[in-house]
Amino acid sequence: MMANETVGRAPIVIAPFANERAREWPLENFHEFIRCGLKDGYDFVVSGMRGQRPLANVLVRSFPADRVRNACGATTWREMQTLLRQAPFVVANNSGIGHLAADLGQWVLCVFSGSHSWVEWMPRGPKVVTLARMPACAPCERERCPNDRDCMINLRGSFAYAEMTAIIRDYSKKTRGQGTVHQAVQVMTANISPGVTQ
């Protein structure tokens, strides 16, 4: 997609935080994801609570301020729902924002930690893509990972971006000209990699 095709479009919503560190995709991976999207002409807004604003600043500070905005603690609940409804898609961990966006019927990329079973806890909705890298130790249900969160660190941002945009592109081709799509589409992409032991 070229930049001129995205002029005037609402930003992609990035929700990089969760209530457990083990469930958070590293900021470096979100950074790589955003970098890929900027090349395709997308803008981004980072969501979160006021207390998460300093960490979000770390994520956004190397990007142009008019392209990537830190909205942590700066939106009301109603404003956040509007952002989600307008976004081309939402990128989140297994967190409240991901589940809310799925409930709203939006495209959601949920990057799922190996700490929990993605089959049981992933967001449910008509346009949800769940990426889960499940090593041998998963699901561990631990708050602290003895393997340095291998399941999250090694799920690259560029891989996630390519998967998400390819799925949306293919979906659009298949549904173009068909009017309203009544059948729910649940896409689950797992990059399974054994070799990490408990």
Image: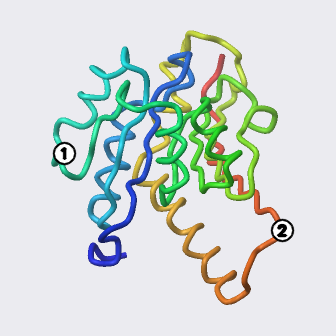
Disc on the earlier residue, 2 or 1: 1
Mark 1, Cα crowd under 10 Å, few <14 / some 14-19 / many 20+, is: some
Quarter of the rendering occupied by the N terminus:
bottom left
Crowd rating for badge 2 (residues with CA inside 10 Å; few <14, some 14–19, many 20+):
few
Measuring 53% from the left and 59% from the top, which residue is drawn there? Answer: 164
For residue 104, side relative to residue 75 (left or right) = right
Q: What residue do we see at 56% from left, 10% from top?
A: 144
Look at mark 1 in the image and give the residue it sits on. 63
The amino acid pointed to by label 2 is Gln
* Quarter residue 8 falls in: bottom left
User: Disc 2 to disc 1, how far (Cα)?
Assistant: 38 Å
Q: Would you identify the image quadrant in which residue 135 lies?
A: top right
Residue closer to the observer: 75 or 168? 75
Residue drawn at 60 percent across, 10 percent down = 143
Q: Secondary structure at mark 1?
A: loop
x and y percent of residue 93 in the render? 55, 34
- Relative height, residue 7 to residue 188 (above, below): below
> Where in the figure is residue 171, as x and y percent of width and height?
64, 74
| Residue at image coords 64%, 29% | 114
Camera-nearest label, 2 or 1: 2
Please name the colour scheme applied to the rendered image: rainbow
Amino acid type at image mark 1: Phe
Most foreground residue, 144 or 82: 82
Q: Secondary structure at mark 2?
A: loop
Disc number at residue 183?
Answer: 2
Q: Position of residue 137 (x, y in %)?
A: 68, 23
